[in-house]
Amino acid sequence: MARYLTEQLGQKAPEGHLNRKTRFKEDLSMDSLDMIEFMMFLEEEHELDLDKGDVRQSKTIGEAADNISKYYGEEDFK
């Protein structure tokens, strides 16, 4: 996740400054289109079929990771 956010958002997401509490909207200024692109990246990169509602409702990086892990397990999602 951090790699994508750093590459796509640049200065908004400086490498090393992202953590589980980083908020998509408030801290990274991500809008709904950014979230859709983020979900598409995760699906392609990790061969996932995500529940769009769960991920889109996530407010932080940690919430997104937890929502994805509940379907795929922590070992599968790295």
Image: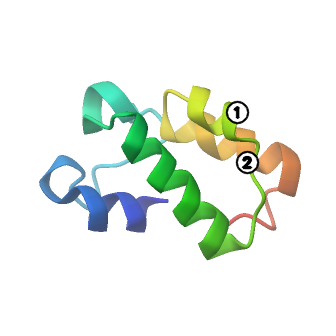
The amino acid marked with disc number 1 is: Asp
Which x, y percent locates residue 51?
Answer: 76, 42
Q: Residues within 10 Å of mark 1 (few under 14, many from 20)?
A: few
Residue drawn at x 50%, y 41% is 61
Say how many tags the image has. Answer: 2
**Element marked by disc 1:** helix
In this rendering, would 1 be left or right of 18? right
Q: Is residue 44 above or below residue 12?
A: below
Q: Position of residue 23 (x, y in %)?
A: 39, 31
Instruction: Give coordinates of residue 78: x percent, y percent.
Output: 66, 67
Q: Which residue is mark 2?
A: 68
- Is disc 2 surrounded by few (<14), some (14 to 19) or many (20+) residues within 10 Å? many
Which residue extends farthest front?
33
Tell me residue 62's x, y (percent).
57, 38
Residue at (49, 59) in percent of width and height: 1
Is residue 19 in sight in this rendering?
no
What amino acid type is highlighted by mark number 2? Ile
Q: Quadrant of residue 31?
A: top left
Position of residue 44 relative to residue 74, above or below, is below
Q: Is residue 32 left or right of residue 11?
A: right
Relative to the observer, which residue lies in front, 36 or 74?
36
Q: Secondary structure at mark 2?
A: helix
Residue at the spot of label 1: 54
| 1 and 2 marks in contact (CB < 8 Å) | yes
| Type of colouring | rainbow
In-front residue for pair 71/51 = 51
Q: Residue at 69% x, 31% y: name it.
A: 53
